[in-house]
Amino acid sequence: MFLRRRHTQKDDSEQRDAKVIELRTAIGPLSGRCSLSCTDACLMRYLEARNWNVDKARKMLEETLKWRSTYKPEEIRWHEVAHEGETGKVSRASFHDRQGRTVLILRPEMQNTTSAENNIRYLVYLLENAIINLSEGQEQMSWLIDFTGFSLNTSVPIRTARDIIYILQSHYPERLAIAFLYNPPRFFEAFYKAVRYFLDPKTAQKVKFVYPKNKDSVEMMQLYFDIENLPNEFGGNATLKYDHEEFSRLMAQDDVKTAKFCGIDEKPYQIGNGHSVAPEPAPIAQQAS
């Protein structure tokens, strides 16, 4: 039985590798930043998102390449979105989950702006930042969403939530490992029912509701996080303190890392009081169309 299982795993691996080769052949030669981002691991995520259907995965990937060529998420810089992060409504955690994945912390109660476009741009920036900070061999991230103080006044409009879900599912497939919604109020259930309509089944399975008084949900969360690293807002022992100026310094450093990876000739910019100033990036790597 052990030998049969080992052979089955080997066969599955070989079939996946063959699908990756088939998909790479289907999309054809890539250059510039497209070739940097379309690694075998990337192709595997698109295949996974489309149940290993090569044609569907190809169409999905081509749409992403078109989106990236116009939206240019890798060119967004902290100084352009820093005002969105002043309250810490979305930030990258200083800790990882038990699998070594990057963690994004979302705090809806800290919503400080009303522009849907700017909110989405800020989240895209942090998605890109989370990816550039993934551990070697790791393709996914975890989300922690704190609903403390959440109200209808601070909730994201359903249309904006729909647009965020579309971008996450269409252009960052299989990047989300798990999303914990911690202690959401009862009225949030109606909002989630409306939003869930836009979630594909795979994504919906990754969304977990956690209530402090529900032992099972708390234990499930602790399977993913070390309680000593977990902020007390999420039932852990650590203290969550968002320092915008310090976070800005980290993001500025990461912007240099992103520019270097993407082949963009860019000078570091100065940080002061959480705000930054930088020259416009000058691309030196060819952008695939």
Image (cartoon, rainbow, N blue to C red):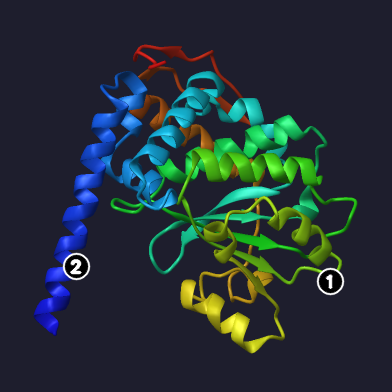
Where is residue 132 shown, x and y percent of the image? 41, 41
Furthest toward the right, the residue is 153
Q: Quadrant of residue 56?
A: top left
Going 35% across and 13% down the picture, which residue do you hit? 286
- Sequence-first tag of 1 and 2: 2
Mark 1 vs mark 2: give the one in front: 2
Q: Quadrant of residue 144?
A: bottom right
Q: Along the line of sight, which residue is nearer the eye, 79 or 134?
A: 134
Query: Where 154 sits versus 201, above or below?
Result: above
Query: Where 212 sits versus 31, above or below?
Result: below
Going 38% across and 61% down the picture, which residue do you hit? 100
Secondary structure found at label 2: helix
Amino acid type, residue under disc 2 in the picture: Gln
Going by the image, does 186 lie left or right of 235? right
> CA–CA distance between discs 1 and 2?
44 Å
Q: Which disc, if any, is residue 186?
A: 1
Going by the image, does 75 lie left or right of 243? left
Q: Quadrant of the N terminus?
A: bottom left
Going 56% across and 35% down the picture, which residue do you hit? 125
Question: Can residue 248 be seen by looking at this rendering?
Answer: no
Residue on which disc 2 sits = 9
Q: Quadrant of residue 179?
A: bottom right
